[in-house]
Amino acid sequence: MTTPDRLMAIELVSEACAHGARKYKACEILDISVRTLARWEKVGAIDQRRGSKRMVANKLSQAEKQRVLRIVNSSEYRDVSPSQIVPDLADKGVYIASESTIYRLLREEKQLAHRGLTRPAKHKKPTSHLATAPNQLWSWDITFLPSQVRGLYFYLYMIMDVYSRKIVGWTIQHEQTADLAANLIQQACLDEGVERDQVVLHSDNGSPMKGATMLAMLETLGVVPSFSRPSVSDDNPFSEALFKTLKYRPNFPLTDKFETVFDARAWVVMFTQWYNNVHKHSGLKFVTPNQRHSGKDINIMENRHSVYLQAKKQSPARWARNTRNWQLPKVVTLNANKKAKQEVKCKKLNASN
């Protein structure tokens, strides 16, 4: 943690304790120990570590460093990588430093960088989004469904609610287009009664996701688009997990495959019915997505908690600590960054007061 983070942690725990929370519980939420917090409060939040004072015997002198830099920046070697410089010097009977040492010196001097068109593009991590209720944050993607014709696939478009994991819309088509995606989004918004500026729609960077028709439809519906970084599947984890669940179902036709698009649609109808209404989701502490989406999960979790309290009351010797935690998280985060994680921790602290 940085010094500002430590100061914020001290302030948050102090505020939570002032409202009646236990200090060890507040520290547990912030993922620090009570002893660590006590040390910060006693000696200050500034990092007291000074690093190692051990002298390295094989460390290059300042003159040797300058010699290495002078050679690698010479007209002969300035456009050559250290991996090529070292063997070339060896052929001439010269040794200045190891390849790794040269790389380290160039890195310290900020000379180890791509130039011009060779510089790779940098992509920032996508914006973090929080959902505290259904129909605030959706995720969608397209996957392939195999047909019995070699090289021919059907395309499954599927939208899910990140908060409840409910499948709120899907379609299967012969092709991937922005027009088909736009129609699906429009239908899902109508089915769920979504209003303008209510929902954020996250997806990857495929052409159907960023097509002009799709973006125009999102603008018309008042849906805020959000995109993953190129070639980074982890930025869209909820849809990826859903597709894995779909393709690992025991009755998924992996060998027989789908004969027609109508067969594929009939199978996905059954899968959606099972997933939304029957499947007890491990990420939802084993309630169904529809129960979470409709708010029925609150009573279910309260009933489970009561059952466990009654069991503990009847046989207290079997329970060394508290009963199983049946509370679902009040906040679900997509692509959480440092700021979002801190915000979630603050919400948890406020909820515990």
Image: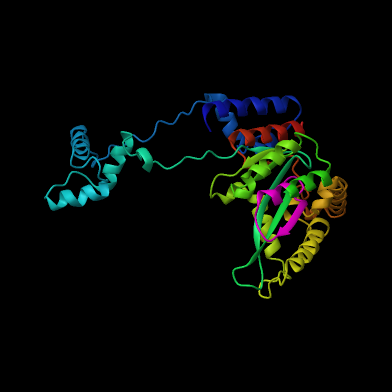
Percent position (x, y) of residue 128?
63, 38
Q: How is the image coloured?
A: rainbow
Q: Is residue 227 left or right of residue 200?
A: left
Q: Can residue 212 be found in the magenta stretch?
A: no
Answer above or below: position of 272 versus 139.
below
Residues 317 and 50: in front is: 50
At 61% across and 29% down in the image, what residue appears? 9
At 45% across and 41% down in the image, what residue appears? 121
From where the camera sits, is residue 286 visible? yes
Query: Which span of residues is magenta-colored?
Result: 161-182
Q: Residue furthest bottom?
A: 256
Q: Quadrant of residue 331?
A: top right
Q: Quadrant of residue 353?
A: top right
Answer above or below: position of 269 versus 46.
below
Answer above or below: position of 333 versus 311.
above
Percent position (x, y) of residue 145?
67, 64
From where the camera sits, is residue 327 visible? no
At 75% across and 48% down in the image, what residue appears? 183
At 55% across and 44% down in the image, what residue appears? 229
Percent position (x, y) of residue 89?
16, 48
Q: Is residue 24 left or right of residue 232?
A: right
Q: Can residue 173 be found in the magenta stretch?
A: yes
